Amino acid sequence: MVTEDQRRRLERERNWLEELSTLQSEKVERIQKTLIIETDPSRKFQYEQVLQEEECTLKEFSDRLCEIENQLQPAPLPTKSEPKKIQQKILILAAIPQPHNLRLDKEMREIRAAIERATRRDLFEIDARTAVRPQDIRRAIAEVRPQIVHFCGHGMEDGSLVLEDDGGNHKPVSPEGLAALFKLHAKYVNCVLLNACYSEKPAKAISQYINYTIGMNQPIEDQAAIVFAQGFYDGLGYKKLDSQEIFQRAFDEGIVAIKMENLAHGQIPVLKKKLG
């Protein structure tokens, strides 16, 4: 648990790193655009080397921001008169393979903020991992044993989710591979949210083993994906009603959040339930 003085220092560092991260993202984007139009092989090679270094710096900023957010999480304070509440562990996984320049750092911060605002925030414990490779996902799920797994990143039309390889490049993982992974963890994972384009197919495959799986039936804009996630986690934080399934309620809240923002994406998120 951090002291008040440590909290202030961490908050100052977070604000500073957020500014640096924004500037670094813009710098990476400029280099990427220059690399696209450069025709001289030697200069193209130089730009590729510079781009790799700048992307590593951006990843370091993002990783440190996640560490700070984890340190700033308030610890629940159970009282003698109330039984200790069982926490729901949320594992957030993000991948930004080259040449995509998705602002997943922003999305992850917005998701964390939505969870922090939840009415029953003390029910949740968050763990975030970035630049994930297939082996990173396998190990993270086994290590954290989460009840909720949230993936944000890029999806392909064939239903593959795009992770990273050791060089930060594309590493597609098929719906069948993802389903096989979650089959191993079906005893404690209750819900999987795939906040990525074309993720309905892997969601359907995963739903063979997991009670609730959410995917996207077509491309979804970053802002719509964030708004849906905010509504979803708001819904998870509400007091559970006996007559309603909590994940169905959270999904419905996410859909309403999109529609109330006048975003034309209300039919994109789909909920798949395990049969039987």
Image (cartoon, rainbow, N blue to C red):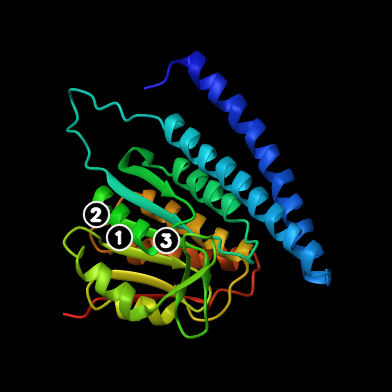
Residue at mark 1? 138
Q: Residue at the location (43% across, 62% down)?
A: 151
Of mark 2 and mark 3, the one earlier in the sequence is 3
Say whether marks 1 and 2 touch (CB < 8 Å): yes
Label 1, secondary structure: give it: helix
Of mark 3 and mark 1, the one earlier in the sequence is 3
Task: Report how far apart the C-alphas of labels 2 and 3 lie in the structure.
Answer: 15 Å
Q: Is residue 258 above or below residue 197?
A: above
Horizontal side of residue 148 vs 252, given as left or right: left
Residue at mark 2? 142
Q: Amino acid at mark 3?
A: Arg
Farthest-out residue, bottom: 158
Instruction: Assess disc 3: are there few (<14), some (14-19) or many (≥20) residues with their C-alpha within 10 Å of its C-alpha.
Output: many
The foreground one among 168 and 230 is 168
Horizontal side of residue 271 vs 51, given as left or right: left
| Total number of numbered discs in the rendering | 3
Instruction: Assess disc 1: are there few (<14), some (14-19) or many (≥20) residues with their C-alpha within 10 Å of its C-alpha.
Output: some
Instruction: Assess disc 2: are there few (<14), some (14-19) or many (≥20) residues with their C-alpha within 10 Å of its C-alpha.
Output: few
Label 3, secondary structure: give it: loop
Q: Pinpoint residue 202: horizontal percent, then vertical percent.
A: 38, 78
Say whether marks 3 and 1 touch (CB < 8 Å): no
Farthest-out residue, front: 42
Q: Residue at the location (75% across, 58% down)?
A: 47
Q: Amino acid at mark 1?
A: Arg
Whether residue 222 appears in this view of the structure is yes
Q: Amino acid at mark 2?
A: Ala
Horizontal side of residue 272 vs 154, given as left or right: left
Residue 133 numbered mark, or none? 3
Q: Pinpoint residue 241: horizontal percent, then vertical percent.
A: 28, 56
